[in-house]
Every structure is written in structure tokens, then in C-alpha cells.
């Protein structure tokens, strides 16, 4: 007999999946419900799974692990997909896969199952992550196979005398965890339509925000956010607190067209108040303490890292290698960032660090300036040297017969003398750029 460990959210799809897997594969189903900070009460999940036919059921709070082992590396790596999406849903999937595989080993199960459909990225992330952890594991996706509508599913359960959640059919498909919330479907599929207010639940609209800004001072210790307004708190609590404050001030709404791994463009709405604030702050502090060439190299790796997370490649040596790179930069990311939150805007207004590379005596235009102005003369002379060399050569080139045809009569007139050509060229260039 097959034993299958199912990621059970308690919703309609995964409730119906329990009897469906049992019938279709003659399987014993073990239900696993994970608390990733989705803000739902999961107390009854175990009883409901067992009542629906699961032979065993687990409910695990994995918020700590999610925050420390998934969110934090992604924050430090600056992982934001296509410049906008902080990857809340995408980061949760490898953790879900890990827990399913761990419990499969404990329960001597040969397979895992999830409720993803065939159109999204999540099926890829869970499947690929599970196989990275156990290449022998089988992965089942009932909702991808059964071809039932919502009404069919309700009927399927009714016929079998199984009670399923009878929640009102939401106009949206949503996924939420500690790092943010994804909202899709319904009216949102028209990219021209403004999202209705009822799509949002973590953030207030601009009109509903307080009329006074909030100032948030975030302390980082070696790249880890540790304090909010000088009150130290554990990471999960800190993320929840920042989300609450930022949400009240309308920060963290994202509306974008996104490229899915499965080849389609989709319109996505996200709410990620904590992620937006913490990424903004971390990036700012890192900029203060990191040399120019290193920060630029890191920005390239951030794009790569976000793609890896998005594309289900969390458990790969590539991701681990970037983590190792990023971790060498974090000890200096220590200090404070001050942010102003106001009607949807999150603006950095101050930053400081004992490791700042900002040197006031070098930067100032006031008294106390230690910058060597005389050194600028030689620096500029050499900096501009290759530019000047090219300009001289191209002037010489102008003297070749027939080389002026496309440039214009005035330049052609001046070809007799290279110096005159330089002057004429300058005039033409100045004219082009509107000087
Ligand atoms: N497009 C986002 C992503 O691929 C959000 C997915 C939302 N998932 C869901 N089951 N509603 O990460």
C-alpha cells in the first residue's frame, strides 16, 4: 500500500485530495499542515484532516525556521523578483517540501502530494525541492489531474459523506505567509483594472492611512534585523511588528506583470509590508558600508538569486554559493536605518553604522574638508586621456579623402586642417546635443 504525505491547508482542494488519493492510488494519506505565519487558526486542522480520512495528521509551527533559514538569506541577498516581488510565496515552497519529505521519512511514505494546479510556479517549486532532498520520492498533484471544478469537488465530498469547508467562494486566489500575501484571479486578471480594495487585507489604502507619518528606526546586527525603535525582538516577532506598522501606513502594495516560469505573463498583486520595509532598510545600510565594486557585483547576484528562488531552485549548490558570497558582506551591515512611512510611501531618511565607508571629512563642502582638491587635476588628466586620444585620432581620420560624405558640408569644408576639423566637429556635436 502506498503512503502519501499531503500538504493539507484545510481548504477545499486539499480536503478533497485526501479521499481522492486514497481512492485513486489506494493510498494511506498523512496530512501535514504548516504554520508559516499565514495568520490562520490551525487548531482544528488535525481533527479535520483525520475526519476527512487521513490516517495521521501533523500541525507544525515552522515560522522560526521560515524566518531564519529562508526569509533572512533572501533578505540579505536582496532577492526581489523582477524588481518588485519579494518572493513570499516562492520562499515558502522549499520549506513546505522539506517538511513533507522529512515526515515522509518518519512515516515510511513513498510519496508526497500538494494542492497546486498545473498553471503556476508552485507545483514546480514543491516538486523540484522535494526531489532535491530525496530523488526517490514520488510527487502527486491531485488538483492538476482530477479536472474537477469547485462545484464538482463539493459534490465529490458530499457523495462520500465527507465534510469540507463551506467558506464563501472568494473572488481571488490567495496565498499568505510571514513575508507577504499573493493575490490572483477574478477581476485582477484584467491588467487594466485597478485592484478593488477587497483584494487587500494586510495594507490600508492611502485614504485610510493616518495623516501623520510614522518613523521607524531599524537596527541591524551583521545583516540581521534585531530592533524596532530600539526595542529588541526575535526575528519572527520583528517581521510581524514591521508588517503591522507598515500595513497601517499603506506600505507594501505591489501590482505587476510578472513572467512565470511556465512561460506565461500574469498580473500579480502582492502585499508585503514587512518585506518592502526590511529590504529597503537592508539595502540602504549595505550601501553605506560596502565598497562600490562589491555592491555592484552583489546587485547582479541579487537578480540571479531571485530567479533561483522564483524558479524552484532553492536546494541547489548555486544558491548555497551565493549565500556564502553574501554572508561575507554581512558583518559590516550593522547599524541603524531610519524610515518614514506615510500613505503608502516608505522612504529612508537616515542611516548610520560604525562600519560606514561614508567619511564626512571627505564628503563635506564645509570647513574640515580633507579631500585633496589638487589631486583632482592629475586624476582628471589621466581619466580623460583615452577619450582625448580617440578624439585626436578621429580628427585625423576626417582628413582621409571621401570620409566626410555623410557628416555634412560644414565639416567637409574644414578637412584641410585637422585642427579645424576638431573645431567643426565640436560644433556639430554641440549642435546635436543641444548645447
Ligand atoms: N505568482 C506568485 C509566485 O509565483 C504567487 C503565487 C501564488 N500562489 C497561490 N497558490 N495563490 O510566487
Image: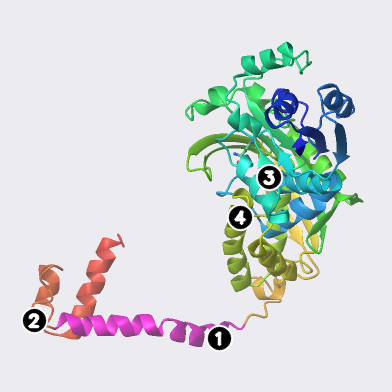
Q: Which residue is drawn at the image coordinates 73% and 55% (left, top)? A: 133
Of 125 and 225, nearer the camera is 125
Q: What stretch is highlighted in magenta?
A: 372-399
Which of the two discs, 3 and 1, labels the residue nearer the N terminus? 3
Of 154 and 421, nearer the camera is 154
Q: Residue 374 carries which label?
A: 1
Locate residue 236 relative to residue 293 in the image: left or right: right
Of 216 and 369, nearer the camera is 216
Q: How crowded is mark 2: few (under 14 residues within 10 Å), some or many (20 or more)?
A: few
- Image quarter for residue 181? top right
Q: Alpha-carbon distance for marks 4 and 1?
A: 48 Å
Q: Which mark is residue 396?
A: none
Q: Nearer the viewer, mark 2 or mark 1?
A: 2
Residue wearing tag 2: 401
Image quadrant holding the N terminus, namely: top right
**Residue 390 falls inside the magenta stretch:** yes
Which of the two discs, 4 and 2, labels the residue nearer the N terminus? 4
Q: Alpha-carbon distance for marks 2 and 3?
A: 74 Å
**Residue 163 falls inside the magenta stretch:** no
What percent of the width, then of the height, locates residue 273?
Answer: 72, 40
Amino acid at each position: 500500500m502506498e503512503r502519501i504525505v499531503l500538504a493539507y491547508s484545510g481548504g477545499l482542494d486539499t480536503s478533497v485530495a485526501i479521499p481522492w488519493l486514497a481512492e485513486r492510488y489506494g493510498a494511506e494519506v498523512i496530512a501535514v499542515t504548516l504554520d508559516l505565519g499565514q495568520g490562520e487558526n490551525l487548531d482544528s486542522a488535525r481533527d479535520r484532516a483525520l475526519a476527512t480520512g487521513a490516517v495521521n495528521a501533523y500541525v507544525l509551527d515552522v515560522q522560526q525556521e521560515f524566518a531564519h533559514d529562508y526569509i533572512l538569506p533572501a533578505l540579505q541577498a536582496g532577492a526581489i523578483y523582477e524588481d518588485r516581488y519579494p518572493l513570499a510565496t516562492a520562499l515558502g515552497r522549499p520549506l513546505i517540501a522539506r517538511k513533507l519529505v522529512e515526515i515522509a521519512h518518519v512515516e515510511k511514505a513513498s510519496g508526497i502530494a500538494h494542492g497546486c494546479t498545473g498553471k503556476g510556479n508552485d507545483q514546480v517549486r514543491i516538486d523540484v525541492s522535494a526531489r532535491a532532498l530525496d530523488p526517490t520520492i514520488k510527487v502527486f498533484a491531485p488538483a492538476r489531474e482530477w479536472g474537477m471544478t469547485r462545484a464538482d469537488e463539493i459534490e465529490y465530498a458530499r457523495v462520500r459523506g465527507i465534510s469540507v469547508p463551506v467558506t464563501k467562494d472568494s473572488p481571488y486566489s490567495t496565498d499568505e505567509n510571514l513575508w507577504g500575501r499573493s493575490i490572483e484571479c477574478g477581476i485582477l486578471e484584467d491588467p487594466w483594472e485597478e485592484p478593488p480594495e477587497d483584494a487587500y487585507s494586510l495594507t490600508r489604502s492611502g485614504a485610510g492611512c493616518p495623516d501623520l507619518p510614522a518613523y521607524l528606526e531599524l537596527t541591524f546586527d551583521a545583516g540581521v534585523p534585531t530592533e524596532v525603535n530600539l526595542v529588541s525582538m526575535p526575528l519572527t516577532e520583528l517581521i510581524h511588528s514591521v508588517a503591522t506598522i507598515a500595513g497601517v501606513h499603506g506600505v507594501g502594495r505591489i501590482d505587476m506583470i510578472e513572467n512565470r516560469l511556465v512561460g506565461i505573463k500574469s498580473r500579480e498583486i502582492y502585499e508585503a509590508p514587512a518585506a518592502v520595509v526590511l529590504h529597503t532598510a537592508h539595502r540602504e545600510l549595505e550601501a553605506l558600508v560596502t565598497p562600490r565594486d562589491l555592491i555592484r557585483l552583489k546587485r547582479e547576484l541579487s537578480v540571479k538569486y531571485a530567479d533561483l528562488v522564483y524558479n524552484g531552485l532553492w536546494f541547489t549548490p548555486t544558491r548555497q554559493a551565493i549565500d556564502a558570497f553574501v554572508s561575507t558582506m554581512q558583518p559590516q551591515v550593522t547599524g541603524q536605518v531610519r524610515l518614514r512611512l506615510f500613505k503608502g510611501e516608505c522612504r529612508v531618511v537616515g542611516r548610520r553604522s560604525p562600519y560606514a565607508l561614508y567619511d564626512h571629512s571627505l564628503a563635506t563642502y564645509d570647513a574640515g574638508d580633507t579631500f585633496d582638491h589638487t589631486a583632482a587635476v592629475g586624476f582628471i588628466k589621466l581619466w580623460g586621456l583615452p577619450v582625448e586620444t580617440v578624439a585626436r585620432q578621429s580628427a585625423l581620420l576626417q582628413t582621409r579623402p571621401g570620409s566626410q560624405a555623410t557628416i555634412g558640408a560644414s565639416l567637409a569644408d574644414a578637412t584641410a586642417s585637422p585642427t579645424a576639423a576638431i573645431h567643426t566637429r565640436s560644433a556639430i556635436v554641440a549642435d546635436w546635443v543641444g548645447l
